[in-house]
Image (cartoon, rainbow, N blue to C red):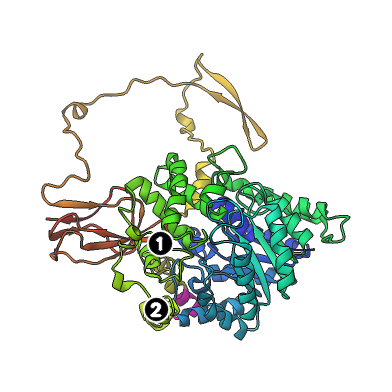
Amino acid sequence: MKFTDTTFRDGHQSLLATRLKTADMEPMAELMDTIGFHSMEVWGGATFDVATRYLIEDPWERLKRFKSLIKNTPLSMLLRGQSLVGYRNYADDVVEKFIERSAYNGIDVFRVFDALNDERNLEKSTTAIKNVNKHLQLTICYSVTDGGSMGGPIYTLDYFTNKAKSLESMGADSICIKDMAGLLSPFDAYTLFTELKKSIKVPLQLHTHYTSGMASMTALKAIEAGVDVVDACLSPLGLRTSQPAIEPLVMSLKNHSRASGLNLEVLHKASDQLETILKKYKTDLEMPRASIIDAKVLSHQIPGGMISNLISQLRELDALDKLDDVLADIPSTRKDLGYPPLVTPISQMVGTQSVSNILNGKYKMISSQLQNYLKGMYGKSPSKIDDELLSQVDSKDILNQDSRPADLLDPELNNSSEKVKEITENIDDILTYTLYPTTGMKFLRQKHGIDPILKDESQNQIEKSTPTISKNDETKSPSKSSNLKTFNVFVEGQHFEVEVDPVYRKPKITKDDITAEPIKDNNEKSDGEILLAPMPGTVSKYNVQLGDQVSKGDTILILEAMKMENALSSPKSGIVTEISFKEGDSVIKGDILAVIS
């Protein structure tokens, strides 16, 4: 039995929103290479975006560093078909070059999926991977409708076997069943892999999540049915919304005909090392629930990585108390969209839309990406989209589903090269900008020393969890009073005896405190109507200039929030008399973005 380790990618993507830094994984890499994994998933998914957006790290350098340290184990990445590692479909020239550079920098196995299981969106990446002579693993996203198990009107056994046959005919070297939300039950797994083994000649792999609590049982039944490879990760990042822990699976198979042959002692050593590293990520690992499983996933079907991102986004919006409301909204939003599998980028669209529905009202604000989904730019939805929701886009913009969506996209790389030519001519940098024009440009300016590198989010969180001591000048230290108390303080296993002397002071009231005028709200304007940021985000671009005449409903700017682009419209007809930010600026909820007079 073979195992793919996901610790360096989906393990931390699922549990701490992909915040592990390269420097913290490097010390483990060589030890992990000795374990004997079938492959190690180290790249793709959200790692690329998070590295540039939050960690201020170059993801290409991360890949090259892993390749230099991990010499014996094939390196794997997760690729979103025509969407690569982004949130929209990219032109064919971008797909070809990205795959070429990924292979050159160290990727051996490309796990490729399309969020709608639309084979048309896999065609270009399939050809590109074959051209660089790397392992092509085509993937089926596992999903269910309302019943919580395989079957129903869409996701039947025939649906999955027919998809697998189609992928094999496209030239897949192996096929993966990607159960991103942990919905595949043990006996459904046995039925599915038993049938696939009869129909498919290439190796089969299972990727699942522990979210519902079924993953280890599902993995064992899949192994019993003949699956060739199972994804798992080291126990400190296992279970919860991540993959099953590898150590119990190895032990369960120890005296079985399909024993893995992996050394438990080496696995324990690697897990101990990971435990030490994770101490600095305590804040990221905090979960709002005591339970390590979420039985409600059978209803909302949000995958593990998306749940950690939802929690992170709601915390940033100071709306974590709305998590249950958001999760309750997701099934109805998904139904309106034609029951798409909830995997990135579709899960991101649905999750973000549900957040907006709860905070701003049902479908009051729809991201540009979701509008493109309604137009068919992401492919064909599994079933009919709600007519009322579909009316949000012009019917003449809806694509003919007989054509490949990417055929309508113009080449992008030349334009991207022109946009960043004053900063860099490096092709990997150009690809970074192409994937994320707003945050990518911000990262490149920091990488090349044009803009200062601000303290990143994870470092801020580490510092927040670290106690600080303010010390007065020793020459002015007061005498100890009779109120002095001694406390035992324990910090990560270390004991400190601390003396605390309470200080009682009455607050000073000055004349200014009495006569000062009330502080005006920052958002007050003497004339005109203001356009406020509905949530924290980044200004992607302004569609207007000072002095422009606009009509009510015209798009004033594009705000990138929660990884989606949101068009913010004018609240009235008039003239643009103030533009408060520039492209690339970060804003918080309530910031004045523009004034219309």
Is residue 197 visible in the rendered structure shown here? yes
Residue appearing at x 39%, y 64% in the figure: 369
On whether residue 290 falls in the magenta region, the answer is no
Q: Which labelled disc corresponds to residue 110? A: none
Decide which of 352, 387 is in the foreground and name it. Answer: 387
Q: Which labelled disc corresponds to residue 385? A: 1
CA gap between label 2 and label 1 equals 34 Å
The range drawn in magenta is 422-431
Q: Earlier in the sequence, mark 2 or mark 1?
A: 1
Decide which of 374, 243 is in the foreground and name it. Answer: 374
Q: Residue 258: horizontal and vertical position, in percent?
A: 84, 61
Decide which of 391, 490 is in the foreground and name it. Answer: 391
Query: Is residue 540 toward the left or the right of residue 36 in the image?
Result: left
Q: Name the residue beneath numbered marker 2.
A: 416
Q: Quadrant of residue 70?
A: bottom right
Query: At label 1, which amino acid type do we have?
Result: Ile
Q: Residue 568: horizontal and vertical position, in percent?
A: 27, 58
- The answer to whether the residues at label 2 and label 1 have Cβ atoms under 8 Å apart is no
